[in-house]
Every structure is written in structure tokens, then in C-alpha cells.
Image (spheres, rainbow, N blue to C red):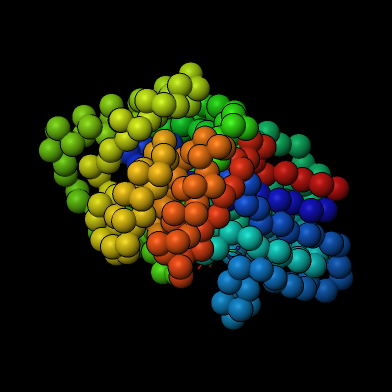
Amino acid sequence: MVITVPATSANLGPGFDTLGLALNLRNEIEIIPSEKQEIEIYGENADFLKKLPRNYFVEIFTEHYKYLTDKEPKFKFKFNNKIPLSRGLGSSSAVIIAAITAAYEAAQVPYKKDKIINLALNYEPHPDNITPATLGGFCVAKLRKNRVYFLKKFIPTYLRAVIVIPNRPISTQRSREALKKTYPLKDVVANISSSSMITAAFFSEKFDILKYIVEDKIHQENRMKLVPDLFKVREIALREGALMSTLSGSGSTFFNLAYKDDAYSIYAALKDNFKDFNVKILNFDNLGVKVYN
Ligand SMILES: Nc1ncnc2c1ncn2[C@@H]1O[C@H](COP(=O)(O)OP(=O)(O)OP(=O)(O)O)[C@@H](O)[C@H]1O
Ligand SMILES: N[C@@H](CCO)C(=O)O
């Protein structure tokens, strides 16, 4: 069995813990029945992951597989990771969603994707990465009484993501702990109106308005100070025609939304100005976690 799961860009600026979308940059996990458990890891951060005392995917997979079958799992796991860790591209969410999905598939227990999302809450208490990682597309998700309510919209193929991945990690957990506990009413209203407009723009496919309305008063500026070059990334991307330019999740990646025809000039300007950052043009993903038997 092979499971693949997309990277995700959460928050989209003002949509803190609420808005997120999926990118066509996937981790792939092959799971083969085997008397002896084996783990092979290739791709992004492979050396770091191999040295960890436990593998997060195998840990979550085992927990759910044993619950569903009352048996010890006997599998070989082969990871081919394309999503970098601690760069705000939803690496840990991708692992959580893929591991729970794989456990249900291996146990041959029927499931719906919303069950996977709600089970994932036990590992990640905000729904803005786990929802698009499961469903794909642009997602708006609300957590209420420990249940996720969500809506998904297909992202049109005439859009592209131009992402800038600095060579500096930002831990989601640590950067969340650094956020202010209270905000002035005017800042709260700025975020509500901005994230509502982003949601409406994606659902109505009226993307031009994004150039004028995206602002965040809750988390971005503080997090961007950890990688000051990001202020210049945003300035250059918007100058070159990006529709919106926001921190991806908790960072350090910056997410730029563009029309397909504008993507290359934005990419070239960013590549030219940030030679030691990884700049990529990506399609969007509209499928989420996928299983191939
Ligand atoms: N592909 C993976 N395979 C195994 N374990 C992983 C993988 N990605 C993440 N993890 C585990 O999750 C931990 C947290 O990962 P990471 O720092 O990427 O999470 P994050 O900061 O929540 O997310 P993001 O990647 O969006 O910044 C890692 O230290 C590792 O233990
Ligand atoms: N909403 C989360 C997203 C993390 O990818 C945060 O900003 O901490």
C-alpha cells in the first residue's frame, strides 16, 4: 500500500488557526507486510529523522492499528519525504493524517475523511493544516467543542503558489507560545474582515481583490522578525504581481499566490534576491491524502 499526503500552507495571513490550502508537494509512504518491522527514510531531513528515538508516523500508525485490530502491526515502512520539517509547510500534520489513514486502510476498517480530521485533533489542536492535508483544496475550518467543522473549495488550475523556503526553521509550538494573549478590538476586526474576504474570494473565484485586503494583526509580524528577510520577500513578491503574500503557517516559508502567467516573474525576482533560499513554483493540490493499493 502507498499513501501520499500534501504539504499545506495554513493561516494564509489573518486566518489564524482557520484558513489553509494544500500544495502539490507530497510525502509518500510505502507500507509492506513484514514479519520484522523495518523503517527506511529518504528525502527531506532524512538524516535528522533517522536519528530520532521514535518515528512519529509509526507511533501514530501503531496506536490506531492496535486499537482497530487488537494486533501488533507487522509492516515495513518506506518514507520518501518531499515536505521539509519546521518550515511552515505542515510536515507534522502530513504525518498525522497519513498515519491515521494508513492504519484504517491496513486494518481494512471503513472510514470517512472527516473522521480522520477529528482523530487528528488529538495530535494537533488547530484544524488549519490537518483539514487541507486530508481534503486538499482551500479549506476553512472551525474547532468547536472538540469537533472540526469545515468547508472546502477547489483551487482553480490557473493559480500557482510561489513559495520561498529559508534555510532557517521556526518551531510552531515555540512561536505560538510567544504570541500575545490579548489584542485591541481594531486588530481583531482587521483579522475578521481580512480572513472573511479571503474566504469569499476563494469561494467566488474573485482573486483580484486579494491585492488590497490581506493584513494580519495577530501573529505574522512577530514571527517574521525571526527571519527579517521575509519582509523583503513580501515586498518583492507583491511588487512583482503576487495576489497575496503571507507567512506559511508559523513559518519560516513565505507563501505567494499568483496567476499562472505571473508566477515565473515572481519566482525569478525572488530567486535573484535570495540566492540561499529555496524558491519553488507549485501547483495546488485538490485531493488531499491519497491511498494506492
Ligand atoms: N516526515 C516526518 N516523518 C517523521 N516524523 C516527522 C515528520 N515530519 C515531522 N515529524 C515529527 O514531528 C516533529 C515536528 O515536526 P515539524 O517541526 O515539522 O512540525 P511543525 O513545526 O508543527 O510543522 P511545520 O512543518 O508546518 O513547521 C518532528 O520533530 C518529528 O518528530
Ligand atoms: N495556525 C497554526 C499553523 C501552524 O502551521 C499556527 O500559526 O501556529
200 or 205: nearer the viewer: 205
Quadrant hosting residue 270: bottom left
In this orientation, which residue lies closer to the viewer: 151 or 231?
231
Q: How many marks?
A: 0
- With 27 as the anchor, is 145 left or right in this view? left
Picture layout, residue 178 above or below residue 202: below
Regarding residue 223, the answer to whether it shows in the image is no
Indicate the position of residue 27 as horizontal and vertical percent values.
66, 56
Residue in the picture at 59% in, 32% down: 158
Image coordinates of residue 243 in percent, x first then y, are 41, 36
Residue appearing at x 46%, y 33% in the figure: 141
- Residue drawn at (19%, 48%), measured in percent from left and top? 181
- Provide residue 94's location: percent of width, then percent of height: 59, 52
Q: Is residue 226 above or below residue 191?
A: below
Image coordinates of residue 108 in percent, x first then y, are 81, 44
Describe residue 72's horizontal placement relative to residue 220 as left or right.
Answer: right
Q: 286 or 135: which is nearer to us?
A: 286
Camera sees residue 46 = yes
Residue reaching furthest to the top: 204
Residue 40 image-quadrant placement: bottom right
Q: 114 or 283: which is nearer to us? A: 283
The residue depicted at 67 percent of the width and 37 percent of the height is 287
